[in-house]
Amino acid sequence: QAALWNHARTEARAMARATAALVARAGANPIDAERDAEANLSARTDIDNVNVTITVAPTGGSVVVRVTGDAPGIVIGTTSAVDVEVAMPVEGWSSL
């Protein structure tokens, strides 16, 4: 059970990190990035009930991506909750 949960958490963390980088560094639209991350996790992993939430700080200084879902259990019908959050600073150019 622990191995399944750990694998699901690793997958969720990797997606959260990639999505945060996409928004913070490439300037992707957060709504589109949420939708794409949810679709990718749902299609490519065993995580069920995937939910991705992206929060951009009001000052625009950071992006936080939270991924939640349910990892499958060894016993059929059981699950373990997965909840991962990754924060990343927004990079960009500024004129002095």
Image (tube, rainbow, N blue to C red):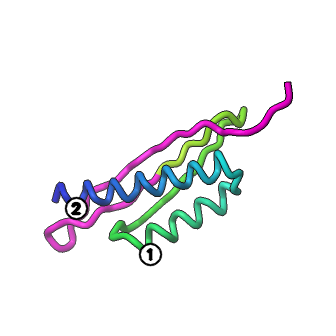
Q: Specify the farthest residue to the top.
A: 96
38 relative to 48 in the view: left or right: right
Whether the magenta-drawn stretch holds residue 3 is answered as no
Disc 2 designates what residue? 4
Name the residue at 35% across, 66% down: 47
* Residue count near mark 2 (Cα–Cα under 10 Å), binned few <14, some 14–19, many ≥20: some
Amino acid bearing label 2: Leu
Provide the residue span drawn in magenta: 67-96
The image shows residue 92 at horizontal and vertical percentages of 73, 39
Q: Is residue 74 magenta-colored?
A: yes
Q: Residues within 10 Å of mark 1 (few under 14, many from 20)?
A: few
Mark 1 secondary-structure assignment: helix
Q: Secondary structure beneath disc 2?
A: helix
Query: Please, which residue is most extreme toward the right here?
Result: 95
Residue 12 percent coordinates (x, y): 40, 56
Q: Which mark is residue 43?
A: 1
